[in-house]
Amino acid sequence: MPRSLAPTPVEHTYQDMLALWLSFFDRTQWDGSRLPNDARPAFLEALYNGVMAAIIRLTENLNLTVRQAGTAADAPAPAAAAAAVPSVAVSSAQLEAERPKDFQIFINLVEFVQQLLPALPSRRFRPWVRWRPAPPPRRWRCA
């Protein structure tokens, strides 16, 4: 039987790429780099901003909607559905993802970010934070 010449697809996880991304941000590995020393901070800033923008763009494009588990045969008739009052407390076991692959991508992305961001300087993250808490009332302030 002839073997196919097509390459076998290889699945990668975020764990395979985490060391690579961490090495991009590691200044100690830049000693042999051709990038001039004065250009390195701007490069790191652009790299960090590009990674953050890609993470946000990816999450915006994922379909993370869920629906009540069951088949079309289980669905009530239109008149019965209109009369039914939806339950406020729906168990997550009764829900299924419209696109399970998008949920898996989201889970992998969250795990990747949880390991990548703490390894990077927090000052790079500050411009990406839009919410700022209000100062505490005066009676809570330390003198």
Image: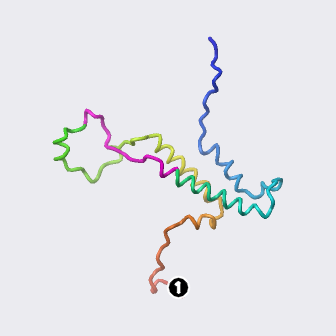
Say which residue appears at 54% left-offset and 49% top-offset: 109
Say which residue appears at 64% left-offset and 48% top-offset: 18
Residue range of the region highlighted in magenta in the rendering: 58-74
Magenta residue check for 61: yes
> Taking 62 as reference, is 43 left or right?
right
Residue 63 at what x, y percent from top left?
43, 46
Task: State the quadrant of the N terminus.
Answer: top right
Task: State the quadrant of the C terminus.
Answer: bottom right
Residue 106 at what x, y percent from top left?
50, 48
Say which residue appears at 64% left-offset and 45% top-offset: 17
Asked which quadrant contains residue 81, the reply is: top left
Q: Please identify the residue farthest to the top as the structure is shown.
A: 1
Q: Residues within 10 Å of mark 1 (few under 14, many from 20)?
A: few
Residue nearest the viewer, comparing 99 with 116: 99
Say which residue appears at 70% left-offset and 56% top-offset: 25
Residue 53 at what x, y percent from top left?
57, 56
Residue 125 at what x, y percent from top left?
60, 64
Question: Which residue is identified by label 1?
Answer: 142
> Taking 65 as reference, is 26 left or right?
right
Residue nearest the viewer, comparing 37 with 123: 37
Residue type highlighted by circle 1: Cys
Say if 80 sits above or below 51 in the image.
above
Say if 138 sits above or below 73 in the image.
below
Asked which quadrant contains residue 115, the reply is: bottom right
